[in-house]
Amino acid sequence: MWSVKNEPKIRVGIMDHQTEVIGHLDGNFLRDGLVPLSGVFLAKADAKMIVLFDQTFCEICRSPSIELTAQKDLTPSTVRSKTSEDGGEKACSRRVFTLFNVTIGNRFHWERKEDQTYRGDLILRLRDDGTICAINQISLEDYLKSVISSEMSAEAPIEFLKAHAILSRSWLLAGLDRRKGEKTPAGKTVQEEGEVIRWYDREDHDLFDVCSDDHCQRYQGITKIVSEQVEEAIRETSGMVITYHDEICDARYSKACGGITENFETAWDDKRVPYLRSISDTSTPHDPIGTEEEASAWILSKPDAYCNTTDAHFLGKILPDFDRETKTFFRWKVEYPRKELEEILQEKTGFDFGTLKEIVPVSRGPSGRISRLKIVGSKRSMVVGKELEIRRWLSDTHLYSSAFIVTAEADRFVFHGAGWGHGVGLCQIGAAVMATQGFSAEGILKHYFSGVEIRKIY
């Protein structure tokens, strides 16, 4: 069990494998503890060095590693920040920096670039391949303020925000604890004749603890609204984690389970994690999916579930703006002309399946999510898994989930699906609905994670 006297600091990878990084330092940042730097800067990879330029494009230094430490303010600086619906200005007593053109939603359907502003220190590291990695070093609790404001709206119900703070803190500390011993698993690929089984876990990040995108946890600095409710949620749950048998839980979560959450092994390694077992996202249990007939009936229905909501006003209060672009998530439909899907498959896999004939589920988890899928073509047939790899093979970006059924209609393939994400652990939309119905943060967490306790470790 983790036990620390003081709040830890963590390193978050913001941009990686870049030939140059451009940003702005709001106030003085000390370069490696020496010369202060402020304003616009440019870092370029050049001849096994990072060359740092100031806003006049004068070279400041060159080194394979540059640390820019936020100098404490004697007086508050003014940081442009969204503090209300119409924007506003917020006084901040700590220096911040902005990085331009940061990719968010990498490889997801809402991928885009944004300028992102961060508290804490900026570290630039040169990789062996001659590219730059930009890292934000920040206290864990400040990191969490951003995470729960980036994952969901900062105006979401307070008990949901508290639950998410405990959840995200647990996920992070469980990973850091594992890194003390064995290297963190980065997933696995098993490729045999006619079969590719691949899953992605926490990358074995070599220069930082976590990345800033959905692969780890969304972390968009102070660019998103950080409300008084977020501050309260972090303050009231400081140092609190989810535990199972005195170990911090590797707590997972996704946007919407679709009515039943999923077992850990459907998406990741073939092992049973007791607190990451399938449960119904409702007070009245649903039967787990066991056959293709049951999967079809489940996916084509709209059962009672906490995450079964179409209330636009409510969703507007809990989802970030880019998530609100996804209009259907509890049940969804995607159609492809046969030729288009054949082209997607060849581009994503490198295999020419020829004329696509069938897409056949081989095995499913209790939520209906497919863990192994057979793709049958005139030239080649293959089995693919697990959950995320299936979603990647069948879309330019990702299908919303692998809980789907497929029908061939004329010269088209039609996917009817359920849920948004891998479905393991906490269902974010469902948990937010639970909060509006009067559930406490502890009640929400104990609903999604069986047999756990909530403990304060610092």
Image (cartoon, rainbow, N blue to C red):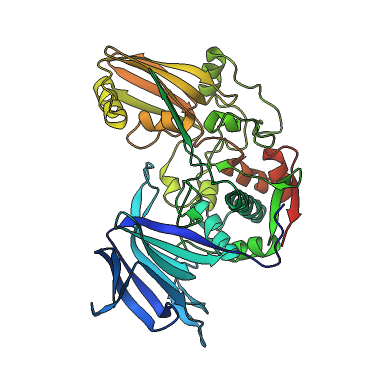
Query: For the point 37% across and 41% down, which residue is it?
Result: 109
Determine whether, in the image, residue 365 is placed left or right of residue 126: right
Q: Quadrant of the C terminus?
A: bottom right
Q: Position of residue 448 (x, y in %)?
A: 67, 39
Image quadrant in which you'd find residue 190: top left
Q: Is residue 383 above or below residue 169?
A: above
Query: For the point 47% across and 77% down, which residue is it?
Result: 70
Query: For the point 44% across and 34% down, which residue is it?
Result: 400
Task: Give 174 or 355, whichever is nearer the viewer.
Answer: 174
Q: Is residue 354 above or below residue 386?
A: above
Task: Give 260 or 121, whichever is nearer the viewer.
Answer: 121
Q: Position of residue 341 (x, y in %)?
A: 29, 25
Q: Is residue 361 visible?
A: yes
Q: Position of residue 151 (x, y in %)?
A: 51, 51
Q: Position of residue 57 (x, y in %)?
A: 23, 77
Q: Is residue 439 visible?
A: no
Determine whether, in the image, residue 173 is placed left or right of residue 94: right
Label tally? 0
Query: For the point 38% across and 28% down, which residue is it?
Result: 334
Q: Is residue 268 above or below residue 413?
A: below
Q: Is residue 109 above or below residue 58?
A: above
Task: Give 144 or 309, whichever is nearer the viewer.
Answer: 144
